[in-house]
Image (cartoon, grey):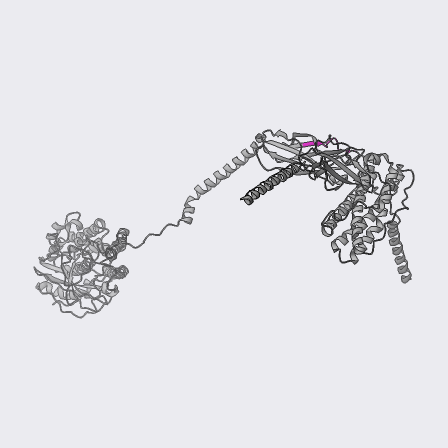
Amino acid sequence: MSLCGAMMKSSVEVNLLLLLVFTLCVKAMRYSPPEKPVLTRCRSPEKETFTCWWEPGSDGGLPTTYALFYRKENSETVYECPDYHTAGENSCFFNKNDTSIWVNYNITVVATNALGSTFSDPVDIDVVYIVKPNHPEKVTVTVMEDKGWPFLRVSWEPPHQADTRSGWITLIYELRVKLEGENEWEMHLAGQQKMFNIFSLRSGGTYLVQVRCKPDHGFWSEWSTTSYIKVPDYFHREKPMWVLITCFCAFIFLILTWLLHMNSQSLKHCILPPVPGPKIKGFDKQLLKNGKCDEIFSALVVPSFPPTAPPNCEDLLVEYLEVYVPEEQELIMEESKDLNDLCLKSGGCTSDNDSGRGSCDSHTLLMDKFREAKEKRKPREQGSGQAGTESQGNQRDWEEEGSSCAHEDMVSPSISSGRVKTWPCVFSPLPQYSSGRLEHKGSLERAKQHCHSDTLFPLGSTSSSLDQQGQHTKETLRPSNWEFGLSNKQPHLLHPHTRPQRQLQAHSDVNISSIGHKRELRGLHSPAPESTEYVEVQRVNEENMVLLQPVDSERGHMEDCSQVPLGEDYSRVNGVDRDNRLLLQREVTQGDRCFCGDRDMNGERTENCYSLSTATMTQKPRVCIHTAMPVQDNMVLGVTGYVDTSTASTLPSY
Amino acid sequence: MSSNTRSVSVEVVCVLLCSTLSGVCLAPLCMNSHSSCHVVSLSDLFDRVIQHSSRMHGVSNDLHAEFEQHFLPSKNQISRVSRNCHTSTIFTPNGKENTQRMAGQELTEVILKLLLAWRDPLWHIHQGMAHHHDFNNFSSNKVLEMSDMVHELRKGVEKVAEKMQMSGIISNSVSSRASPEAPPLADSPEWRLMKVYDLLYCFRRDSNKVQNYLKILKCRIVPEHGC
């Protein structure tokens, strides 16, 4: 118990002691010698004076005084700062008398308080290297113009303390410019000059200008106070140039537009060449678009094209009856040729004349024949003239030759036995001719009635004259009329006998007298007027015989030709002689249709039925004489391919 | 006969050449009386000299800073209170008033003395730095360059002085015969290093002095440009 009490007493005492010590210590810590000050900087504005500033430390709770001491180079004398107040607090100002250039100063600041003093670290300075001048003064900025373009002229003065005039200090300057509102300054080093020009200004802008300076070895001064300057608007000076440029560009643009417009077509072709369309006849683009191939190709198929069989000249010519074409008819043939072509190619030609002359230039062949016929006729015309049968024969020849070009009416397509290729439609009027038949007296007259009086006898005197016998004059006239009719009325028709007829006409008067009775027909055979009869080619029989049918003129319908008037007719082609001349056979038929004819384009010698026909004339046979008789030499065939009546007359009568 | 003429022609050519060459050689300096010769004005001379001195100071400044950075990282490693430049014996004005108070001639003499005082020490520094491997070549070259510049600057200042004397600015001729000489470098490397450092420091200061004195002179004598 007592121990505890003793212990408690001792602890309390210890605590008290501790407390006492603690308080003493605390008291002692409140005051302390000043902390070591720090010389922050020393600066000289003009290299004649300088100032040093220090930073004091904690004063230790006690009032502290600061003192600056310095020592000069190579001297042990310690001097104290002469001026603590000029430069402000914690500063020391050295005036001119105390400042020595090119002398090393050792400066120290001492802080002193009640408890002690503290020395700062010494600092060695040389005034030459601590020069920091003041900023330039009297900065002026003016706007000046150089050939219409403005620029800024900045001028300034060096700080008044710095003695640059004596050369003691040399300053270099620097200025900076910026537009109002911008962040970046534009720096310009001006050197030792006190004036500077700034170009490339923005019209109407406000500029800020500042200048600073620095000695050749030292620190930069502070920036001078900002000078504001507003650049006047000079856009109006630039306007004419822009106006010129705009006009020039517009002009160029207009020219280009005009050029483009002029060459738009060619450009279009150049840039977008036209897509060539299909050039196949019968090709339907629409079908192609529809996408039906079958229809497309079916449309391309032409029935008659291509020709299944190559056109063979011989085949074509075999089916034709060559007809002498007078020169006047050449033109018609020319036209008909075109029609033929059209009919042939289209295939849909409604013309029933499937008479394509084809590739064979049967036209030329016709021409050749015509020439030959002409040649033949001429001698015949010059002959003594036995107009009669000869003429009739001639005429028959003519007829037959002329009728070779049977038109569609005469040769109906229904005749299927043979391929009668007739001449084209041009010769359609021909049946009128062909139907017309030269009628001799008596039978002739009747035969003549077959002739189309309408066309052949415009004078309308045919029929009357036909009926009359012995009216040779009329008969004679007939051919002449016919001739005229033929020549005038239907000039476009195949009129192979125009010329020979005319030629014969000359002799018609001569032979008129000879023409009389049937028997006197011989006389008629002289080159007297030879009536022309055109016989239609009815068909070609199996034996390749062209069956001619006399045309019934009265009926005007040549289709049947069933009634054959009594009388002689030269509706049969006996054959074709060597010179490609049709040899007509005279026969007298009655009511019968007689077809006879040989056709041989090769000019094979055939008999001349004429003589037989003359024989039959008296007998009035009704049988076609098919037998061929040898050609007698004296059967001179006229140039025109007609049997020369004169020679025929020499034949012995049967 | 032809050989004689040839020799004569050759001689003539040689004489001509020699005369032209001699003419060039015999006219090193232009006299004022000669109008054809281009005369360098005093102002131009001063400008040239001042530029030269400025360049010299710049080199010395760079060299000192480089030396201090490489060899003496701690600035206050060695107390420099007892630094004593060998040129301190030369009385140099240490203020603007003092400088302006000094006559042109004296000032010129001071300049010349300074320049002369530094001719040999720089050469020694160069030699010392070259032979010892503790100095890099870059510093050695700069020391040599400085040495040359000092020599040329001295020549230039002499020319200026001569010009001034001719112009009547300076009465008496400038003489710079007496010039303190730098003490030789110590043998020990540390001393050598310190010596070089001190020399560099001293030279840096002296080059600044020269430049400043020249500027004062120029603005006093030919104050047309840049003053």
User: What is the span of residues highlighted in magenta in the rendered image?
Assistant: A154-165
**Quadrant placement of the C terminus of chain B:** top right
> Farthest residue toward the front?
A2
Estimate the x, y position of residue A219 in percent, counting from the top left: 71, 39
Residue B34: tell me if it is visible.
Answer: no
State the image coordinates of residue B219 (x, y, percent, origin top left).
81, 35
Residue B159 falls inside the magenta stretch: no
Which residue is more in the foreground, B166 or B215? B215
Is residue A372 visible to us here? Answer: yes
How many marks on residues?
Answer: 0
Q: For this view, does B34 lie left or right of residue A218?
A: right
Q: Which picture quadrant has residue A347? A: bottom left
Image location of residue A249, percent across then percent down: 51, 38
Q: Residue at x 18, y 68 (%)?
A: A607
Question: Is A451 in front, or is B136?
Answer: B136
Q: Which residue is painted at 73% across and 52% down in the image?
A: B71
Q: Quadrant of residue A60?
A: top right
* Residue A298 position within the rendered picture, expressed as x and y whole percent measured from the top left: 23, 57
In this rendering, the answer to whether A435 lies above or below B95 is: below
Question: Is the residue B143 above or below the residue A418 in the image?
Answer: above
Q: Residue furthest bottom?
A: A630
Viewport quadrant of the N terminus of chain B:
bottom right
Closer to the camera in the image, A16 or A29: A16
Q: Quadrant of residue A321?
A: bottom left
Q: In this rendered view, identify the residue nearer to me: A73 or A545.
A: A73
Residue A158 colored magenta?
A: yes
Q: Main secondary structure of the magenta part?
A: loop
Asked whether, in this view, residue A467 is left or right of residue A57, the answer is left
**Residue A48 left/right relative to A585:** right
